[in-house]
Amino acid sequence: MKTPIIAPSILSADFADMEKVFKMLNESEADWVHLDVMDGNFVPNISFGMPVIKSLRKLTTKVFDAHLMIEKPERYIHNFKLVGVDVLTVHYETQTHLNRTIDLIKKIGMKAGVALNPHTPVNLLKDIVSELDLVLIMSVNPGYSGQKFIEHTYKKITEAKDLILATNSKAMIEVDGGVNNNNASKLFAAGADILVAASYIFNHDNPLQAIRNLKYF
Ligand code: DX5
Ligand code: ZN
């Protein structure tokens, strides 16, 4: 049976005890670790950057999935490769030369993704989707964990799936924001390949079980 890739976002985890957090993630059925990088400009919040990711890299062999919520992310692509990121996603809204940025991410050996804010239409990816490894559909306004899921996301997932099929793209669809045990199966059925979750997992009494709930519904 095909199951979604689960990518816990450490944004809601205890930053004072990352060894414990990663011990749990390593024991869990999480596939990837989602790293939310925020600069206080593109989004109102500030999170963490390269030095933190470099330290965390020693704690796991799971795929590092970095979601850059920063202005001009193209300045730091090499740096994210150096600290061990495997999948690098930039926001469509930050880019003038998206094609150049995607080329660079792939050329230096990472998978390349593009994230869309809730108001950004999927069809803007029409001329680049065949180059992408991942399309990240934001189901909340980026910046914080713990926000309410935006229902319009289902329609965008369907549109992204249609666009990917129509262009023979190999891109996977990732959904990020407000994902929990109530919407996971519906998101997967709509075409999501990767489910990101922060608060649902890390605020749960049993994070291992929460991860299982997302993967097996
Ligand atoms: C929001 C981040 C998300 C966030 C998800 O800007 O991109 O990855 O951590 O948090 P939840 O799952 O709590 O909505
Ligand atoms: Zn994210």
Image (cartoon, rainbow, N blue to C red):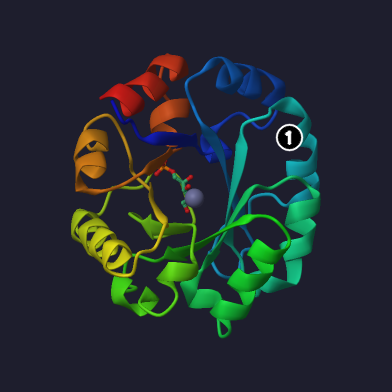
Identify the residue shown where x is 61% and y is 64%.
40
Identify the residue shown where x is 37% and y is 58%.
137
- Whether the residue under disc 1 has CB within 8 Å of ligand 1: no
Most extreme residue toward the front, as rendered?
168
The amino acid marked with disc number 1 is Leu
User: Foreground: 41 or 107?
Assistant: 107
User: Foreground: 44 or 32?
Assistant: 32
Asked whether residue 176 appears in the rendered view, the answer is no
Indicate whether 145 appears above or below 29.
Answer: below
- Residue 182, image x and y in percent? 21, 32
Q: How many marks?
A: 1
What residue did someone put label 1 on? 56
Q: Quadrant of the C terminus?
A: top left
Identify the residue shown where x is 79% and y is 36%.
55
Would residue 207 be found to the left or right of residue 94 on screen?
left
Would residue 172 be found to the left or right of residue 42 on screen?
left
Would residue 83 be found to the left or right of residue 198 on screen?
right
Identify the residue shown where x is 52% and y is 36%.
12
Indicate whether 177 appears above or below 171.
Answer: above
Q: Quadrant of the N terminus?
A: top left
